[in-house]
Amino acid sequence: MKNGHLETGGFFFGFIEILSPNDNLVEKLSSKNRRQTGGMNMPLHFIDRDISSEVSELSSVLIVPCNMCPAVTVAVREKKPFIQFFKHFLKSAPFEDYIRSLQSQLRDFGLVADVFRSSLYHQWFMCMWTARKRKKLGETAKRYDAVLVLGCESAIESVRDAVKSSKCKVIEGMEPTGIMNAQLSFQLPGDISFKNCKIVSTSKRSKDNTEIK
C-alpha cells in the first residue's frame, strides 16, 4: 500500500499495515497472497445478478458468501464502514444486512434459504478455503437444491469442486465489473472504511476508470 492507496496483493494486508509497524511482515504477507491468488488484483467490484428465473423451480437454496471482495463492494455501495471491530468484531455489518435481505427475498419466492458461514478470518477468501472447509460445504450442500455463490469466478470454482459429488445446482449471485482502487481509512475506535473508490477495468484495452459515487 502506497500513499494510502490499495495496490496489487490484496487489501486485507492493508489492515496489518495500519496496525503493525513491521514493514517486512506486511511485504511477506502481501507476497504470499499474490502467489496464492495467482497475482490477481483485489478487491474486485461486483454488481448483483437477477437470479429470479434460476430459482423459480427450486425449493431450497444455500447462500455461500465470500467475505472479502463482495463484502467490500457492499460496504462501498452503502457508504458504510467495512469493519467495526468494537461493534461487530470480524463481521462486516453492511454485508450481513445484505445477506439477510437476500434471504428474505428468496423466502418470498417460497424457498428455504440458509447461509453457509465462515467465521474464522483465514476462511474469508473462498478461493483459498482448506480441504476441510470444502468438504464441509459439500456435505451441507447435499440438503439443498442449489448453492448461491457470492464471489468471483475462483470462488465459484471452489464451490463447484466442493459440490461436484452431489446434484446441487450452482448459481452465480454476483457479477464482477472490475477492480476497486481505494483509499483505506482507519478511524477510532476501530472502523475500517474504503474511500474515493474507483472501478478499474480488467480489460487491458480499456483505459477508462469509473468513479463510485
Image (tube, rainbow, N blue to C red):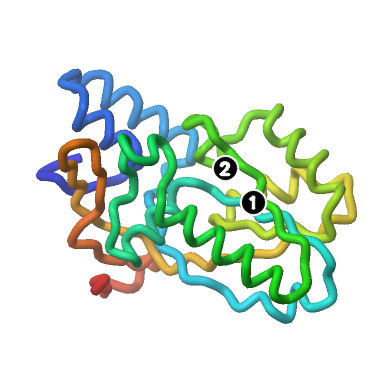
Residue at figure coordinates x 63%, y 57% from the top left: 149
Name of the residue lying farthest toward the bottom: 53
> Percent x, y for residue 65?
58, 51
Question: In the image, 179: left or right of 38?
Answer: left
Q: Label 2's element?
A: helix
Camera-side residue of 75 and 68:
75
Label placed on residue 64: 1
Question: In the image, 32: left or right of 53?
Answer: left
Residue that label 2 marks:
126
Name the quadrant containing residue 53: bottom right
Q: Quadrant of the C terminus?
A: bottom left
Looking at the image, tell me whether mark 2 or mark 1 is earlier in sequence order: 1
Residue 108 versus residue 181 in the image, above or below: below
Q: Which kind of residue does numbered mark 1 sit on?
A: Val
Residue at figure coordinates x 27%, y 73% from the top left: 210
> Percent x, y for residue 66?
54, 48
Q: Label 1's element?
A: strand
Q: Which kind of residue does numbered mark 2 sit on?
A: Met
Name the quadrant containing residue 58: bottom right
> Percent x, y for residue 120?
52, 30
Disc 2 and disc 1 in contact, CB within 8 angstroms? yes
Q: Disc 2 or disc 1, which is closer to the eye? A: 1
